[in-house]
Image (cartoon, helix red, strand yellow):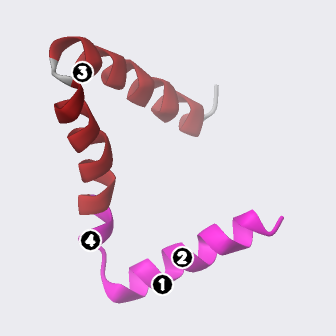
């Protein structure tokens, strides 16, 4: 199993555990808030690089 697959499987497991223990709105807030907060902590140059890589992969 690749490293990204392990991370994805762990994310799904954590999401399911949160879904059971927390109300749906709290889970939604965490699922959307964590990646948004991580993106906002990047420097402008890192954000530019991230956008460029994402576009490059989409065009494949």
Mark 1 or mark 3, which has the lower sequence index? 3
Question: Badge 2 local density, few (<14 within 10 Å), some, or many (20+)?
Answer: few
Q: Which residue is mark 3?
A: 18
Residue 34 screen position, x and y as percent: 26, 50
Residue 40 screen position, x and y as percent: 26, 71
Cβ atoms at labels 2 and 3 below 8 Å apart = no
Seen at 32% across and 23% down, the residue is: 14
Mark 3 or mark 4, which has the lower sequence index? 3
Taking the magenta stretch, the answer to whether it contains residue 9 is no
Which of the pair 57/4 is nearer the observer? 57
Residue 44 screen position, x and y as percent: 35, 87
The circle drawn on residue 51 is: 2
Q: Which residue is mark 4?
A: 40
Residue 23 appears in which quarter of the rendering?
Answer: top left
Cβ atoms at labels 1 and 2 below 8 Å apart = yes
Seen at 83% across and 64% down, the residue is: 60
Give the alpha-carbon distance from disc 4 to disc 1, as whole Å.
Answer: 12 Å
Give the alpha-carbon distance from disc 1 to disc 2, as whole Å.
Answer: 5 Å
Describe the element under mark 1 as helix, strand or loop: helix
Seen at 22% across and 43% down, the residue is: 29
Describe the element under mark 2 as helix, strand or loop: helix
Main SS category, magenta section: helix
Cβ atoms at labels 2 and 4 below 8 Å apart = no
């Amino acid at each position: 199993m690749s490293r990204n697959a392990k991370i994805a499987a762990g994310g799904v497991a954590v999401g399911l555990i949160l879904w059971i223990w927390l109300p749906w709105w709290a889970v939604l807030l965490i699922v959307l808030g964590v990646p948004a907060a991580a993106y906002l902590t990047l420097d402008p140059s890192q954000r530019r690089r991230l956008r460029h890589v994402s576009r490059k992969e989409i065009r494949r």
